Amino acid sequence: MTRALRCLPLLALLALAAAAAVGERSHADGWRRLPQAFALAASALVVVAAAPLALEAGRHLQARRQAGPHLQELLAPAQIRFLEASTPADAKVLFLNNNRVYPLTREAVADTTFEASQIAEWLRPLRSAAEVDETLRRERFTHVLWERVDWGIDWPRPLLDLLADPHSAPRVWESPDGRFTVYALAPL
């Protein structure tokens, strides 16, 4: 959509404001219909501006309707579908390098921003993979979802050591492109 089309709804609001201002100022009989003309023009601008968006929304709805039983595959990423299908309802997942937990119905914890990790700072004082493992399990985490993307986060070495140990945190799923890995944590 062009920049001009995106501004059209704003023009409609400006036209309504202008109509209200003219209505306040006009007292002569000839001016009384001017606010209605401004309102009609503003309504036309809203219709013109909304038409492309309404058509696009209609195309999206039609595509979803045609997807039928495959709609979940279109809406939920593979890692979320795996967690939904392969973890117990009371699972708690720690998301690392990723904060897109929707539409996961399991309890999940993720950083709010990518550049500054509160999770990394929480785990930083721990000195060994065993301490990280114990801390995560004490907090009832059952799984870790790791996205291989560099956000510049200095993840603590003990956390990385834990995820590299197949006995403490076995890989239970990996995306075909290797971008996402789900690790299982042993219960306490």
Image (cartoon, helix red, strand yellow):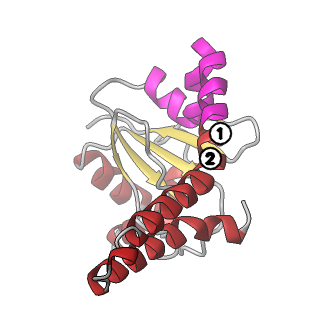
Rendered location of residue 5, percent (x, y): 67, 64
Q: Is residue 9 magenta?
A: no
Query: Can residue 173 be spotted in the picture?
Result: no
Q: In the rendered image, which residue does mark 2 sit on?
A: 51
Main structural element of the magenta stretch: helix, strand or loop?
Answer: helix
Rendered location of residue 26, percent (x, y): 32, 83
Q: Which residues are magenta?
A: 58-85
Q: In the rendered image, which residue does mark 1 sit on?
A: 55
Rendered location of residue 171, percent (x, y): 57, 36
Q: Work out which residue is located at the far front of the displayed protein and give it.
A: 29
Three-letter code for the amino acid on which mark 2 is drawn: Ala
Element on which disc 2 rests: helix
Relative to 73, is 13 above or below? below
Task: Look at the image and tell me in which quarter the C terminus lies.
Answer: top left
Q: Work out which residue is located at the far top of the displayed protein and give it.
A: 69
Relative to 41, is 137 above or below? above
Name the residue: 37% across, 82% down: 22
Q: Is residue 54 left or right of residue 13?
A: right
Query: Can residue 112 be spotted in the picture?
Result: yes
